[in-house]
């Protein structure tokens, strides 16, 4: 039998083991994990060199300190997306600072548009989206899809990192302005690093902004900013759908607002999901079971409320059907994802009704403009390849680079094109260089916008048919030049 002192020591050791084991179990348990804040993990993932004392970084820190409401608004808006993006970055073995890129690009608004035509959290251009296998059509724009756009942006960054021999600062500068511009600047200026380059103002500021954000997020108490609590667990869960559904109806099934449904599924450009084929819907993880349960309860055998089907009759063509329903031929082709105007009797054509639900994310008057593909930036063309055409001849006729054509269409060799196939072409409109657009943010008015962009208030009112200078809506797209 143990002596009394040994017994006491044994009991103490035993209790330590018990408490140690319990604490380890608690740390791994979902209940405790849900209470953890994600920010320490994000801070620990930062790997870029600290440049806190660089004058250009200090300048941007001061700017963010004087615009704390802008930063805090972006961080609150980011909350539903941060867990997923953080883990996607870790999976791809990339610097954790990439989670800050959407703050610079879009202030974490998936509906943001730039005057050049970039959109989504990561502000991907149309050509970049196509080259990274993202779908952009009448029904959806995957540059705004939370999952797809994040994977595309991270893959694109990895590609740029390899392009610049592992230099992430050059890679991220190229993310902003293009690999060609950075490569040309390095060559003509005989430099080897970002800090020595003379670049356009926006690109020159890009890295200092990122490193300023890194410093502030890593040491919020030093810079007196408030990081909102972000739970260290998934916010949303994906469900694979095989039939269309009205987004307003989907929100009702999940017992959430249409606005929250749109914030998680911003890629859908219409009031409905895809009319045919498989697609993914994101739902708050605590509403997933509710949605699935209600989906099974309802009679789910009909198309989305706002879509009708037209069966093609003999002697009908795309033009006559379009005229019958008050649509353009191009619009009808886009809706049905047709690459040919030839129709067969008995074939079904999807027809959108003219009174869709108003979707949050855009102001009412701008919804139709964006839906009509009047958004800024390059316009999408689908070219049918004719006999005797080459990649070079097609590129020349559209005024684009053959390498761009290859990237947009994921072609590895230029000779792989065949007559009868289709090429996606992103062609700059004639007004792209003269016209600029601005997406209205919270707290904006025309005076602030025009002071920031050096434009005329009267001209902006005239360009946008504004009768009341104070009547602006968040996410409204203004033509400013």
Image (cartoon, rainbow, N blue to C red):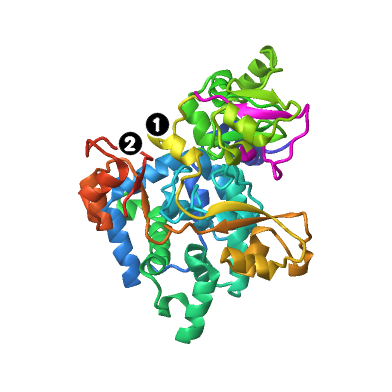
Q: Dot 1: what SS?
A: helix
Q: Residue at x 60, y 52 (%)?
A: 381
Tell me if residue 135 comes above or below residue 161 in the rendering: above
Front label number (2 vs 1):
1
Say few, some or many: other residues with alpha carbon within 10 Å of mark 1 (under 14 / 14 to 19 / 20 or more).
few
Nearer the observer, 322 or 229:
322
* Residue contact between numbered discs 2 and 1, judged by CB atoms under 8 Å: yes
Q: Which residues are magenta?
A: 333-355
- Spatial distance from mark 2 to mark 1, Cα to Cα? 9 Å
Quadrant of the drawing holding the C terminus: bottom left
Nearer the observer, 431 or 121:
431
Q: Residue furthest front?
A: 315
Quadrant of residue 464 within the rendered picture = top left
In the rendered image, residue 366, in percent from the top left (x then y), is placed at: 41, 37
In reply to whether residue 347 is colored magenta, the answer given is yes
Quadrant of the drawing holding the N terminus: top right
Q: Residue at x 61, y 19 (%)?
A: 290
Nearer the observer, 151 or 417:
417
Which residue position is annotated with label 1?
364
Q: Residue furthest bottom?
A: 190
Tell me if residue 300 comes above or below residue 164 in the rendering: above
Which residue position is annotated with label 2?
473
Looking at the magenta stretch, what is its main secondary structure?
A: loop
Q: Earlier in the sequence, mark 2 or mark 1?
A: 1
> Would residue 203 be visible to someone looking at this image?
yes
In the rendered image, residue 337, in percent from the top left (x then y), is placed at: 67, 40
Q: Dot 2: what SS?
A: loop
Numbered circles on residues, count: 2
In the rendered image, residue 347, in percent from the top left (x then y), is placed at: 76, 29
In reply to whether residue 394 is colored magenta, the answer given is no
Residue 69 as seen in the image, left or right of residue 110:
left
């Amino acid at each position: 039998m143990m002596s009394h002192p040994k017994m006491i020591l044994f009991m103490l050791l035993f209790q330590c083991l018990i408490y140690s084991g319990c604490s380890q179990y608690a740390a791994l348990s979902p209940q405790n994990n849900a209470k953890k804040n994600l920010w320490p993990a994000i801070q620990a993932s930062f790997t870029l060199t600290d440049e806190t004392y660089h004058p250009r970084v200090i300048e941007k820190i001061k700017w963010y300190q004087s615009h704390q409401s802008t930063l805090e608004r972006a961080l609150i808006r980011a909350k539903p997306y941060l867990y997923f993006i953080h883990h996607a970055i870790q999976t791809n073995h990339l610097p954790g600072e990439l989670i800050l890129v959407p703050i610079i690009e879009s202030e974490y608004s998936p509906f943001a548009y730039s005057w050049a035509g970039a959109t989504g959290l990561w502000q991907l251009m149309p050509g970049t989206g196509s080259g990274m296998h993202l779908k952009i059509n009448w029904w959806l724009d995957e540059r705004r899809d939370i999952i797809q756009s994040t994977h595309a942006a991270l893959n694109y960054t990895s590609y740029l990192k390899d392009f610049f021999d592992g230099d992430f600062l050059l890679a991220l500068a190229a993310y902003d302005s293009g690999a060609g511009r950075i490569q040309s600047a390095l060559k003509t200026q005989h430099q080897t690093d970002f800090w020595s380059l003379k670049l356009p103002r926006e690109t020159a500021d890009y890295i200092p902004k990122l490193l300023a954000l890194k410093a502030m997020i890593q040491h919020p108490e030093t810079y007196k900013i408030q990081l909102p609590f972000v739970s260290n667990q998934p916010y949303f869960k994906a469900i694979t759908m095989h039939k269309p559904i009205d987004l307003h109806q989907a929100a009702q099934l999940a017992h959430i607002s249409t606005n929250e449904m749109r914030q998680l599924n911003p890629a859908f450009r219409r009031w409905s999901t895809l009319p045919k084929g498989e697609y993914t819907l994101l739902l708050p993880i605590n509403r997933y079971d509710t949605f699935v349960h209600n989906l099974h309860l309802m009679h789910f055998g009909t198309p989305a409320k706002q879509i009708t089907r037209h069966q093609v009759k003999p002697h009908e063509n795309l033009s006559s059907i379009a005229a019958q329903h008050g649509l353009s031929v191009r619009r009808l082709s886009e809706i049905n994802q047709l690459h040919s105007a030839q129709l067969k009797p008995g074939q079904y054509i999807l027809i959108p009704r003219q009174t869709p639900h108003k979707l949050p994310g855009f102001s009412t008057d701008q919804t139709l403009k964006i839906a009509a593909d009047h958004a800024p930036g390059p316009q999408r063309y689908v070219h049918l390849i004719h006999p005797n055409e080459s990649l070079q001849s097609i590129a020349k006729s559209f005024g684009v680079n053959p390498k761009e054509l290859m990237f947009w269409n994921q072609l590895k060799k230029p000779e792989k094109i065949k007559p009868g196939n289709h090429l996606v072409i992103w062609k700059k409109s004639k007004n792209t260089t003269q016209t600029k657009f601005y997406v209205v943010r919270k707290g904006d008015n025309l005076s602030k916008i025009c002071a920031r962009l050096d434009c005329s208030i009267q001209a902006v009112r005239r360009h946008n048919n504004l009768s009341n200078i104070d009547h602006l809506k968040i996410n409204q797209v203004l033509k400013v030049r």
